[in-house]
Amino acid sequence: MRQSDVAFARQVAMKAMTAIGASAIKKTKFVTAVSEIARNAVIYGHGGAITFRVVGIGLHRSVVGECTDRGPGIADMQLALKDGYTTGSGLGLGLSGARRLVDRFDIISSAESGTTVTLESAAR
């Protein structure tokens, strides 16, 4: 994944959320979270890949995004998820902000395998 792929990930996330009938607010929150996680993969994870899938049935559908990189991992997960913590020049709201914007947020990270972030947002 390169910087140009972040915009593409945003577009795919928006289309998936539209497909499940999500509200404008839910769409915006999910797309914002995807953008932040994808950007982190490019900057800190040396690239990676992001996939999306729709799960559930009828009114109980949601979109799951999974972003995986092969970077150095996150040394201190508790610190990285704390508001205001940054290793760059940002505001330090990337991971913690993304976590607040979605219905489910899982992160697995190690120096050996990189980082995988799973985001899920329901239609309602």
Image: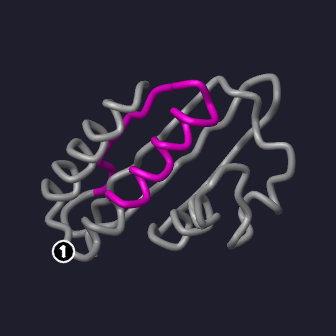
Judge the density around disc 1: few (<14), some (14-19), many (≥20) Cα neighbours within 10 Å: few
- Between 76 and 26, the one lying in front of the other is 76
Point 21% across, 49% down: residue: 16
Q: Which corner quadrant holds the N terminus?
A: top left
User: In the rendered structure, does residue 49 fall within the stretch colored magenta?
Assistant: yes
Q: Which corner quadrant holds the C terminus?
A: bottom left
Q: Quadrant of residue 77?
A: bottom right
Q: Quadrant of residue 74?
A: top right
Give the farthest residue toward the front.
Answer: 89
- Between 119 and 83, the one lying in front of the other is 83
For residue 17, side relative to residue 114 (left or right): left
Please name the amino acid that badge 1 sits on: Ser
Give the farthest residue toward the right.
Answer: 76
Query: Picture coordinates of residue 36 (x, y %)?
Result: 47, 53
Q: Which residue in the structure is indicated by mark 1?
A: 23
Q: Give the range drawn in magenta.
A: 31-56
Point 71% across, 63% down: residue: 81
For residue 116, side relative to residue 80 (left or right): left
Q: In which quarter of the image is residue 44?
A: top right
Q: Compared with residue 107, is residue 8 higher up or lower down, i.e. above or below? A: above
Point 74% across, 39% down: residue: 109
Query: Picture coordinates of residue 7 (x, y %)?
Result: 28, 41
Q: Compared with residue 1, is residue 109 higher up or lower down, i.e. above or below? A: below
Query: Picture coordinates of residue 121 (x, y %)?
Result: 38, 63
Point 61% across, 38% down: residue: 116
For residue 108, side relative to residue 41 (left or right): right
Secondary element under disc 1, as helix, strand or loop, is loop
Query: Picture coordinates of residue 100 (x, y %)?
Result: 53, 73
User: In the rendered structure, does residue 42 fall within the stretch colored magenta?
Assistant: yes
